[in-house]
Amino acid sequence: MKSGKAIGVVLALAACVYSVTAAPVRCADDAKVIDISAKKYKFTPGVITLKKGVPVILHLTSVDRKHGFNDPGLNLRADVNKGQVTELKVTPQKTGTFPFYCDVFCGDGHEDMNGKIIVVD
């Protein structure tokens, strides 16, 4: 069943090429996974350093309630639900510092729930 295996490979590659970024993305089998935890009123880690052109998978989880993850500079946006993993695939195409923040109101400290992604060469 070589054709069945080939179709599976094509579908897997197609899934990796799709991304939430505006630029084309290729996923590698060895893409680095970064775990990000959200809870009132903080993301951990709050600073993430990535390399331009290197694919990464962000695993977002919430420990207390629904939050949002929004990084307009890298065109990343997701809901982060309690007890679930939300996966974002990204391959940064430009260097710089890109602030992210919670865009789902989560209480009086909501406005301080932010961080940044630093993309280096």
Image (tube, grey):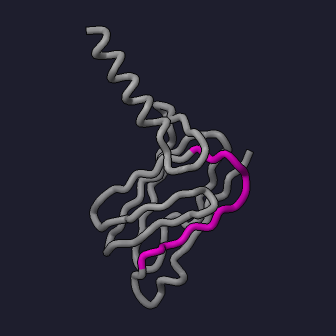
Quarter of the image for residue 98 reads bottom right
The correct choice, above or below, for 24 with respect to 78 in the image is above
Q: Which residues make up the magenta segment?
A: 91-104
Residue at 55 percent of width and 49 percent of height: 21
Q: Where is residue 105 in the image (x, y as percent from the top left)?
A: 42, 81
The correct choice, above or below, for 5 with respect to 12 in the image is above
Q: Quadrant of the N terminus?
A: top left
Residue at 45 percent of width and 51 percent of height: 88
Residue at 37 percent of width and 62 percent of height: 61
Residue lying farthest front? 22
Residue lying farthest top? 2
Q: How many discs appear?
A: 0
Residue lying farthest left? 1
Quarter of the image for residue 2 reads top left
On whether residue 60 falls in the magenta region, the answer is no
Q: Where is residue 52 in the image (x, y as percent from the top left)?
A: 67, 44
Residue at 53 percent of width and 71 percent of height: 101
Q: Where is residue 29 in the image (x, y as percent from the top left)?
A: 46, 31
Q: Quadrant of the C terminus?
A: top right
The correct choice, above or below, for 47 with respect to 89 in the image is below
Q: Where is residue 58 in the image (x, y as percent from the top left)?
A: 47, 52
In this rendered view, identify the residue nearer to me: 96 or 47.
96
